[in-house]
Image (cartoon, grey):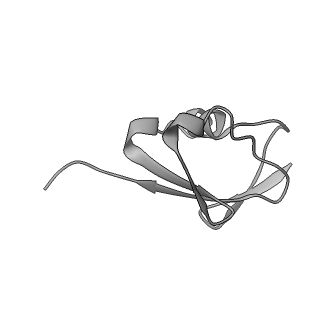
Amino acid sequence: MIIIVNGDSMTLDDGLSVSMLLERLKLTEKRVVVEVNEEIIDKNNFPENILSDGSKVEIIQFVPGG
């Protein structure tokens, strides 16, 4: 399947969840907000939220520091 992540096209296996995508991108679930097709996904639903071909994903990372 092909999805768009932060404006970039990615080809990934079918049946990938938001949690799996974050793991693949080496991102920590605790420090991100994820929006799929203009809907913010609750962190508790990352494992159950399965991406589909054409999904548009926006990932916002929180970086500690000053």
Asked if residue 42 is positioned above or below residue 66 in the image, the reply reads above
Name the residue at 69% across, 63% down. Answer: 37
Residue 51 placed where, x, y %? 76, 46
Q: Quadrant of residue 38?
A: bottom right
Residue 64 placed where, x, y %? 23, 48
Q: Quadrant of residue 54?
A: bottom right
Left or right for 29, reference 39: left
Q: Is residue 28 visible?
A: no
> In the current view of this chain or complex, which residue is farthest to the left?
66
Asked if residue 38 is positioned above or below residue 1 in the image, the reply reads below
Total numbered labels placed on residues in the image: 0
Name the residue at 82% across, 54% down. Answer: 2
Left or right for 40, reference 1: left
Looking at this view, is 47 or 10 the one in front? 47
Q: Is residue 14 visible?
A: yes
Name the residue at 83% across, 37% down. Answer: 13
Left or right for 4, reference 19: right
Residue 65 placed where, x, y %? 17, 51
Residue 40 placed where, x, y %? 55, 57
Q: Quadrant of residue 5?
A: bottom right
Name the residue at 64% across, 39% down. Answer: 21
For the C terminus, the image quarter is: bottom left
